[in-house]
Amino acid sequence: MTARADRLAEARGLLAEHPVVDGHNDLPWALRTQGGYDLDRLDIAADQTGRLHTDLARLRAGGVGAQFWSVYVRSDFAGDRAVTATLEQIDCVDRLVARHADRLAPARTADDMERARAEGRIASLKGAEGGHSINASLAALRALYALGVGYMTLTHNDNIAWADSATDVPAVGGLSAFGREVVREMNRLGMLVDLSHVAATTMRDALDATEAPVIFSHSSSRAVCDHPRNVPDDVLERLPANGGVAMATFVPKFILPAAVEWTARADENLRSHGFHHLDTTPEAMRLHAEFEQANPRPVATAATVADHLDHMREAAGVDHVGIGGDFDGTAFTPAGLDDVAGYPNLVAELLARHWSRADIAKLTWHNAVRVLRDAEAVARDAAGRRGPSTATLEELDG
């Protein structure tokens, strides 16, 4: 065997023992847009190569042991429409897990994750992507938690009334008073505060406000690729004191500087044909393929992601890094990380860079489980000190 083949075999063996906890997969939205939530029409028990990044066989091949399924809705969904669409996404995940109960296990706690791993099933957790999903209602936040939502990303691509997004014009200045109350209520519940997508000012305000560890469910290093979706070093350096974890994403426009401008042009090409720029339906992907044929795409690789993880480990420490691929939420993926079967290629790259087996085990499994367990402990303590908050946006922000 070649050295690379040896490393790949070692990577697969390591993942059999310490599988991947992936922080973010947008399969539910793809099932909505491509199949109308008809789980027979897009059955992940069948090979969905060429249509989806995710199916059961490829999850197993990739060594995935736990998945936060994103119950994302687009940030141009507002008010009650956003809440309803989020409920539909939650229902999709619940039906998906029940349909494939031999392979997927419902999970919301660290113990649930460990139990699923022992059973050989993939722990299936939920994460809401954007505070617009609660329509500025702490009661709605509690309802999502009761339905099994384990984290909420404070914003998506657009600002909301109480928090600034990384990809919008600053309006709030970070978190408002109500935004800080949202963080406190999430801590009381045990819902993880996810700081992917938020402005750096929002990241810092949330770290000031939180009692529990935070996560970045799918964000990489801003020092390696200067994109506002990534995490600045001063924020990474605060994670050891907070206890949180930053989960590196695979989205090329966030990790490869040369891909930033190219993807902006590809997105504009979609919009010029009447598609939303985040559309990954077969029709949109055909337009992308035509654009790529005329305009060759800069290609990221597993080594590109490893560059981010190397820097994130240096800035935050090995106890505070993880993986959040964003599969089925991106039109483009790195070579070697084309779908959920690709994680062994990343682990093999890290082995080639002399990451120890113990450090890789922290990256793939142990850090994420620890963060959830620590958030649960904070929630038990907070629940003994304060009841559910009835604060409103109008009361706190005027």
Image (tube, helix red, strand yellow):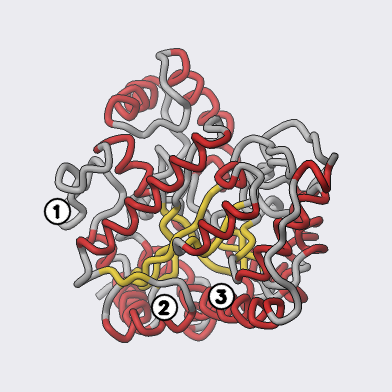
Q: In the rendered structure, which amino acid carries the disc numbered 1?
A: Ala
In this view, the residue in front, 139 or 170, is: 139
- CB under 8 Å between discs 2 and 1: no
**Which residue is under mark 3?**
372
**19 up-or-down from 222: above or below:** below
Is 228 placed left or right of 142 in the picture? right
Q: Position of residue 275 (x, y in %)?
A: 41, 21
**In what quadrant of the picture does the N terminus appear?**
bottom left
Is 79 placed left or right of 50 in the picture? right
The crowd level at tag 1 (other Cα within 10 Å; few <14, some 14-19, many 20+) is few
**Which residue is under mark 2?**
113
Q: Quadrant of residue 209?
A: bottom right
Q: CA distance from mark 3 to mark 1?
A: 32 Å
Q: In the rendered structure, which amino acid carries the disc numbered 2?
A: Met
Q: Position of residue 390 (x, y in %)?
A: 72, 57
Q: In the rendered structure, which amino acid carries the disc numbered 3?
A: Leu
Which comes sooner in the sequence, label 2 or label 1? 1
Q: Mark 2 or mark 1: which is in front?
A: 2
